[in-house]
Image: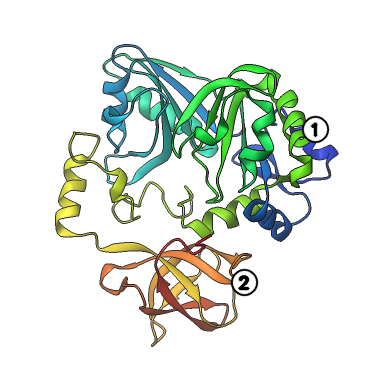
Amino acid sequence: MKNTALTSIHEALGAKMVPFAGYNMPVSYEGVTIEHETVRKDVGVFDVSHMGEFLISGPNALELIQKVSTNDASKLSDGKAQYSCLTNTEGGIVDDLIIYCLNPEKYLLVVNASNIEKDWDWISMHNTMEADMKDLSSEYSLLAIQGPKAVEAMQSLSPYDLSSIKFYNFVVEEFAGIENVIISATGYTGSGGFEIYCKNSEVEQVWNNVLEAGKEFGIKPIGLAARDTLRLEMGYCLYGNDIDDTTSPLEAGLGWITKFTKDFINSDALKAQKAEGPQRKLIAFEIEDRGIPRQGYDIVDEAGNTIGIVTSGTMSPSLNKGIGLGYVPSNISGFGEPIYIQIRKKAVKATIVKLPFYKG
């Protein structure tokens, strides 16, 4: 089990620690509902240092990124970031990731913790153009400072105007007394804020300064459990739940990051799938009665026939109702369509809704 540079601090704070993606991670401190509401109303800080970071550089860096990822990275300029995914040769998703353009010959790829080795091997295998690749995952830490008060709470820690960093933009600036920190606005909660990338040797200083600066704004450390409820209220996909090696980006509603203006791995097959229309779709639903949907529960029709499966589900702290994502046949995926979730022995009525669940 790997630790982040802050593991001992989380333990000292009384965090409940769990194994996650090979790391010893804080799942909660005070409880998921309290932590969830802290991020929605005030500001919270997550240690997400388990995420992976690859540096792709050199004159052929963009060519490699264009080959392995679905979005069009040629649209990126310095200080811009992009959500994308890596596709396999069967039409599924190797991983979803964020691509940061440091300059036209230097890109930072941020990947999911559970897929670091898999992604590295996949990208390396397709690096026929010999772009320079470095795995920085074990050297860097990542903090996510999220919530409507994040900018105000953190401004004292940087000479840079944090409010000027637009969504999916970033800067390399001083933060918490540390030079050359990446400050980005690519949040996974839907409540605003930003992320801090720094070296492992620097993160304890950053963490302490963040908690001190945020004290008067009600900042709290937040665990992975609230991170999951926050992202699900926004309908953001989680790799291993809603997307994986068997789900195509078009099935998962990620057509907006699948650009056929260029060739990428398996683009021809995905282009054909787009023309025909995918057979199944990832839908969002709200439970009408009492009940909490969970990953792996069957989605059934009125007659009790299994028509799909829940990929993510929870009791939404903001809406106080059961919400979830799941795959169903495309012909019954329309908004307002009634479906049923098999919760233990009862088929509980639900309705397909438009994302996000949480409107702010």
Q: Amino acid at mark 2?
A: Asn
Q: Nearer the viewer, residue 155 or 33?
A: 155
Earlier along the polypeptide chain: callout 1 or callout 2? Answer: 1
Q: Residue at x 44, y 55 (%)?
A: 242
Residue 156 visible, this angle: yes
Q: Nearer the viewer, residue 270 or 153?
A: 153
Local crowd size for mark 2, using a 10 Å CA cut-off: few (<14), some (14–19), many (≥20): few
Numbered mark located on residue 223 in the image = none
| Pair 1/2: label in front | 2
In the rendered structure, the answer to whether residue 42 lies left or right of residue 134 reads right
Question: SS class of the residue under badge 2?
Answer: loop
Q: Nearer the viewer, residue 295 or 71?
A: 71
Residue placed under numbered mark 2 in the picture: 320
Q: Residue at x 58, y 78 (%)?
A: 344
Local crowd size for mark 1, using a 10 Å CA cut-off: few (<14), some (14–19), many (≥20): few
Residue placed under numbered mark 1 in the picture: 8
Figure quadrant of residue 74: top left
Q: Position of residue 215 (x, y in %)?
A: 78, 41
Q: Position of residue 270 (x, y in %)?
A: 21, 47
Q: Position of residue 279 (x, y in %)?
A: 25, 63
